[in-house]
Image: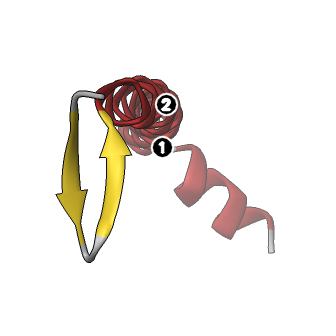
Amino acid sequence: MIGIELLGFDIPLWAFFLIGVIAVILLWKLVKFALKILVIAVLAFIILIGLDILNVFGWIQNLF
């Protein structure tokens, strides 16, 4: 059987391939999640900057 010996165990190549595929899928899901969080954060900052430019926060302070 073709494989790699690691820490005294003979691990077949298909197991490494399977671990690699699972790792790529998990990394892709992590990257997608991070990109969604980044987009949400950027949109929130753009909205805050827009509200600051329109002086909404000053108007709210003047109410109190």
Q: Residue at x 70, y 58 (%)?
A: 60
Q: What mark, if any, has residue 27 been given in the picture?
A: none
Q: Quadrant of the N terminus?
A: top left
Identify the disc placed on residue 22: 2
As shown in the figure, which amino acid type bears the numbered disc 2?
Ile
Q: Residue at x 25, y 76 (%)?
A: 7
Image position of 19 (left or right of 64): left
Q: Is residue 28 above or below residue 11?
A: above
Residue 9 lies, with reference to residue 15, above or below; the image says: below
Which of 8 and 24 lies nearest the eye of the viewer? 8
| Position of residue 62 measured from the top left corner of the image (x, y, whole percent) | 67, 65
Q: Residues within 10 Å of mark 2 (few under 14, many from 20)?
A: few
In the rendered view, would you say 11 is above or below 36? below
For label 1, the residue is: 48
Asked where in the image residue 61 lies, by quadrant, the reply is bottom right
Q: What is the number of callouts on the image? A: 2
Label 1 and label 2: CA atoms lie apart by 39 Å
The quarter holding residue 50 reads top left
Q: Amino acid at mark 1?
A: Leu
Percent x, y of residue 28 = 41, 25
Q: Earlier in the sequence, mark 1 or mark 2?
A: 2
| Camera-side residue of 46 and 50 | 46
Of the pair 35 and 6, the residue shown nearer to us: 6
Query: In the image, what residue occupies the spot 39% across and 23% down?
Result: 14
* Image quadrant containing the C terminus: bottom right
Q: Locate residue 41 relative to residue 5 in the image: left or right.
A: right
Q: Which residue is at 41% across, 42% downward?
A: 45
